């Protein structure tokens, strides 16, 4: 019976689709000091989950490019599944002048 239930259960994708912006680094909500050259990310309030994701790494994908960033901050103005990247992380994917990009991301 358990096997039948497992087969019938829908598959849930762990890939998150959302928007990415960039921000000026400093003291993050996770408690550390960061600089613009760090590959870091601030998560939206839902995914930040009260700080339980601090220190986790995520892989961010955009137009065939991928980067790995570490969760160090909260982005209170970010919508669900949206993230805020450090300047250097954003620039690895697109020019800062682009401002907002449509990305996919997942915890690694």
Image (cartoon, helix red, strand yellow):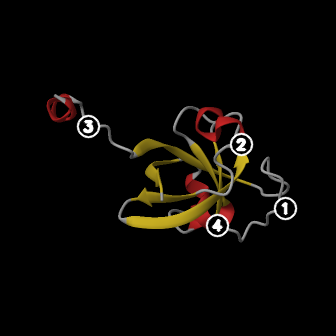
Element under disc 3: loop
User: x, y (%) of residue 67?
Assistant: 50, 66
Q: Which residue is mark 2?
A: 51
Identify which residue is drawn at 51% across, 62% down: 94
Label 2 neighbour load within 10 Å: few <14, some 14-19, many 20+: some
User: x, y (%) of residue 60?
Assistant: 48, 58
Q: Which residue is mark 1?
A: 33
User: x, y (%) of residue 4?
Assistant: 14, 31
Identify which residue is drawn at 43% across, 58% down: 61
Instruction: Give the mark nearest the N terminus, 4 or 2.
Output: 4
State how far apart marks 4 and 2 are (Cα): 18 Å
Label 4 neighbour load within 10 Å: few <14, some 14-19, many 20+: many
Instruction: Give the mark nearest the N terminus, 2 or 1.
Output: 1
Instruction: Give the mark nearest the N terminus, 1 or 3.
Output: 3
State how far apart marks 3 and 4 are (Cα): 31 Å
Indicate whether 13 appears above or below 69. Answer: above
Instruction: Give the mark nearest the N terminus, 3 or 4.
Output: 3
Tag of residue 11: 3
State how far apart marks 1 and 3 are (Cα): 39 Å
| Between 38 and 8, the one nearer to me in the picture | 8
CB under 8 Å between callouts 3 and 4? no
Element under disc 4: loop
Indicate whether 37 appears above or below 80. Answer: below
Q: Which residue is mark 4?
A: 39
């Amino acid at each position: 019976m358990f096997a039948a239930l497992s087969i019938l259960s829908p598959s849930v994708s762990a890939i998150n689709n959302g928007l990415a912006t960039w921000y000026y680094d400093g003291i993050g909500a996770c408690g550390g000091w960061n600089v613009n050259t760090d590959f870091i990310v601030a998560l939206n309030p839902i995914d930040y989950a009260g700080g339980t994701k601090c220190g986790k790494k995520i892989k961010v994908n955009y137009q065939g490019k991928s980067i790995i960033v570490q969760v160090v901050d909260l982005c209170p103005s970010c919508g669900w599944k949206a993230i805020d990247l450090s300047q250097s992380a954003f620039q690895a994917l697109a020019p800062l002048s682009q401002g907002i990009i449509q990305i996919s991301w997942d915890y690694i």
